[in-house]
Amino acid sequence: MHETTDCCSQKKIQLDWQTVLSTYKLYRSLHFIKRHGPILSGIYLKAVYGGEGYVPVFHTHSLMTPFPVVSLTAPVALTNSKGAEDSIRFVRHTNELNTIISNFRIQCPAAFTQPLTCTIVEQLYNSTIANAIDYPVQTMTDAVLLSLWCNKKEQAEAQIQSYRSIIASWPAAAQKRCGGADRWEADIRSQWNREQITNTIQTELTRFKLDHLQDMLLACE
């Protein structure tokens, strides 16, 4: 959050959320993370109004493919009654935190569910892909690998065929970025090896210095 927000205020915001999010660990300033097997879930207090306020955003990140940063995949932001992101300034945080938390819990139960289930993550991925205004190839990859991780091979095959059709409908420039539908499918199939994926997960945890995180487990249904 921007320096225009008083340092003590920022620390209080972070501590207040850290107290509520007891199963999460502080990853970076105003960013909390926990691990569910091959998936990270997080809550990021996104700065708005030049740092004068924040918006809580839940997200996931798959550890099954190498990525340079912890991504904000399948994000779910707290929204207000008009459907816009609900920006929270410090005074409101101080006076209404319980209500803010309650609203976020209702709008995004995944952020507070333990254990997290593959069905919940699948729903987040499906919503992201269906409502994307960009080209969500990474989310598609994450969705297929999650199905394979949970031994849902028929579902993974159906996803591959569905996503191939979506990728084929994109503009040429967008297809070029992922190598096209054939290349994407080939990459997915080449990645799937349980031992290889397990090694990738450990490598990614080490990369992000998250080896210490307790595995809160992912329930495959």
Image: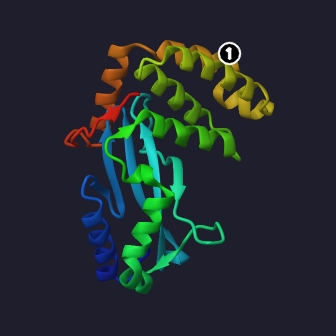
Q: Which residue is mark 1?
A: 182
- Label 1: few (<14), some (14–19) or many (≥20) C-alpha neighbours in 10 Å: few
Q: Decide which of 129, 6 is in the foreground and name it.
A: 129
The colour scheme of the drawn protein is: rainbow
Q: Amino acid at mark 1?
A: Asp
Question: For the point 80% across and 33% down, which residue is it?
Answer: 171
Percent x, y for residue 18?
A: 27, 64
Q: Secondary structure at mark 1?
A: helix
Q: Quadrant of residue 60?
A: top left
Whether residue 106 is visible, yes or no, is yes
Residue 1 appears in the rendering: no
Q: Residue 120: where, in percent of width, then height?
A: 47, 40
Give x and y (percent) for residue 89: 46, 81
Quarter holding the C terminus is top left
**Picture mark count:** 1
Please give left or right for residue 197 compared with residue 57 in the image: left
Which residue is located at x 58 percent, y 31 percent?
Answer: 140
x and y, in percent, of residue 32 in the image: 33, 56
Q: Is residue 185 above or below residue 39?
A: above
Q: Quadrant of the N terminus?
A: bottom left
Residue 196, image quadrant: top left
Q: Which image quadrant is residue 2 in?
A: bottom left
The answer to whether 164 appears left or right of 29 in the picture is right
x 36%, y 15%: residue: 194
Taking the spot 46% from the left edge, 19% from the top edge, the residue there is 148
